Image (cartoon, coloured by chain):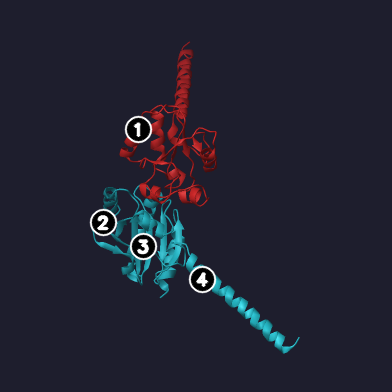
Chain colours: A cyan, B red
């Protein structure tokens, strides 16, 4: 095989690889499903139970545990005392818990907040927000968002709290 | 004779208790155990909804409104979360004029089946009103996993 032919083959292979990588990158960035792991967490601003603005952007640089829950959801109720504990234990290291209640009415949420001594902001969610996180069609749904604002993990249903805690610690260590 | 009479009484009491227990079991709709005849699987409901021959069920959503707005079964009417008294009042009003043999399908899908707080009160309500042809859609995990992700028909909005 002549040298010229080898060079042409190498160029052809390089072109094919470049086109393939370019197409793969384009489809990855365009087709990323909302709420998918590695995608940017959707920005939102809601009002917390005290009427104050609750904006995800204001927690940039922290590790955020975003929990979609409801007062009538048994697995959610079981998790929340542990989340309160996480906020106490890891808050100083940069963890921020945020609760998005999917209750239809705020009254039971306020009562629950007091009863469970919740120590992190809670807001009432809506369908648009749920869809921007890939749909919340069952509860609980929990996201861990890294310091870079990207979704690190998405848990549907009751989480394995041991696994969740390990992941929180791992994300907190990543600067 | 001294032993015979108490023995008969104990036996009669035992039989009566067993009968009551059996009656309570039969009449206890709140269990809605997986596999029971009161349930309908997603596959079967889709077949029923798509059939041109079968009787069309009245499909009622008894879950939270945020879930309904994101995705619900086409044609399903929104009642409200069955754990809420106001929703049960609305359910009563909705079916009041219907014949008691009307096929009604209830569903929620908010939570894993054993934890759903909504379908059992709604089912019990219809049962107490005398409805005899009520099914509950069996959603093992949640509506997303067991209905939407499986590609069954879904629409958004109110």
Tell me the element at label 4: helix
Q: Which residue is mark 4?
A: A26
Determine the residue positioned at 39% across, 69% down.
A149
| Pointer 1 local density, CA inside 10 Å: few below 14, some 14–19, many at least 20 | some
- Disc 4 crowd rating (10 Å Cα; few below 14, some 14-19, many 20+) is few
User: Of tags 4 and 1, which is closer to the observer?
Assistant: 4
Task: Tell me, yes or no, whether dots 1 and 2 are on the same chain.
Answer: no
Reply above or below: A124 against A10. above
Task: Report, in whole angstroms, how far the alpha carbon at label 1 lies from the one at label 2.
Answer: 33 Å
The percent position of residue A20, horizontal first and vertical second, equals: 59, 73
Q: Within 10 angstroms of label 3, few (less than 14), some, or many (20 or more) residues?
A: some
The chain letter under disc 2 is: A
Spatial distance from mark 1 to mark 3, Cα to Cα?
Answer: 44 Å
The quarter of the rendered structure image containing the N terminus of chain A is bottom right
Q: Residue A21 got which mark?
A: none
Q: Quadrant of residue A55?
A: bottom left
The residue indicated by pointer 1 is: B92
Pointer 2 residue: A49
The first of marks 3 and 4 along the sequence is 4
Say what secondary structure mark 2 lies in: loop
Asked whether disc 4 touches disc 2, contact meaning CB atoms under 8 Å apart, the reply is no
Residues at marks 4 and 2 on the same chain: yes
Q: Which mark is residue A86?
A: 3
Say if mark 1 contacts mark 2, CB within 8 Å: no
Q: Nearer the viewer, mark 4 or mark 2?
A: 4
What residue occupies the far bottom of the structure in this picture? A3
Q: Please determine whether, in this image, residue A127 is positioned above or below residue B34.
A: below
Q: Residue at x 41, y 37 (%)?
A: B120
Please tell me which residue lies in front, B128 or A162: B128
Instruction: Where is residue B80? Give x, y as percent.
Output: 35, 42
The quadrant in which residue B118 appears is top left
């Amino acid at each position: 095989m002549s040298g010229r032919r080898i060079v042409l083959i190498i160029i052809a292979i390089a072109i094919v690889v470049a086109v393939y990588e370019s197409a793969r990158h384009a489809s990855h960035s365009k087709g990323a499903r909302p709420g998918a792991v590695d995608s940017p967490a959707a920005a939102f601003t809601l009002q917390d139970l005290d009427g104050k603005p609750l904006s995800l952007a204001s927690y940039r640089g922290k590790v955020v545990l975003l929990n979609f829950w409801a007062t009538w959801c048994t697995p959610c109720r079981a998790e929340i005392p542990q989340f309160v504990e996480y906020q106490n234990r890891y808050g100083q290291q940069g963890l921020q818990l945020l609760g998005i209640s999917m209750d239809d009415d705020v009254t039971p949420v306020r009562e629950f907040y007091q009863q469970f001594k919740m120590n992190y902001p809670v807001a009432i969610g809506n369908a648009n927000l749920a869809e921007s996180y890939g749909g919340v069609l069952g509860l609980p749904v929990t996201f861990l968002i890294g310091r870079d604002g990207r979704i690190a993990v998405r848990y549907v249903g009751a989480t394995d709290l041991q696994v969740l805690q390990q992941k929180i610690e791992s994300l907190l260590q990543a600067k | 004779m001294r032993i015979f009479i108490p023995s008969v009484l104990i036996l009669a009491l035992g039989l009566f208790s067993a009968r009551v227990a059996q009656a309570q079991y039969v009449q206890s709709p709140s269990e809605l155990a997986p596999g029971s005849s009161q349930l309908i699987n997603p596959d079967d409901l889709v077949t029923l909804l798509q059939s041109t021959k079968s009787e069309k069920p009245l499909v009622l959503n008894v879950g939270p409104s945020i879930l309904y707005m994101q995705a619900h079964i086409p044609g399903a009417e929104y009642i409200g979360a069955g754990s809420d008294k106001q929703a049960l009042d609305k359910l009563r009003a909705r079916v009041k004029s219907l014949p008691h043999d009307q096929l009604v399908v209830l569903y929620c899908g908010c939570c894993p089946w054993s934890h759903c707080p909504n379908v059992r009160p709604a089912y019990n309500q219809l049962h107490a009103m005398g409805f005899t042809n009520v099914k509950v859609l069996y959603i093992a995990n949640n509506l997303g996993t067991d209905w939407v992700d499986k590609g069954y028909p879904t629409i958004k909005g109110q």
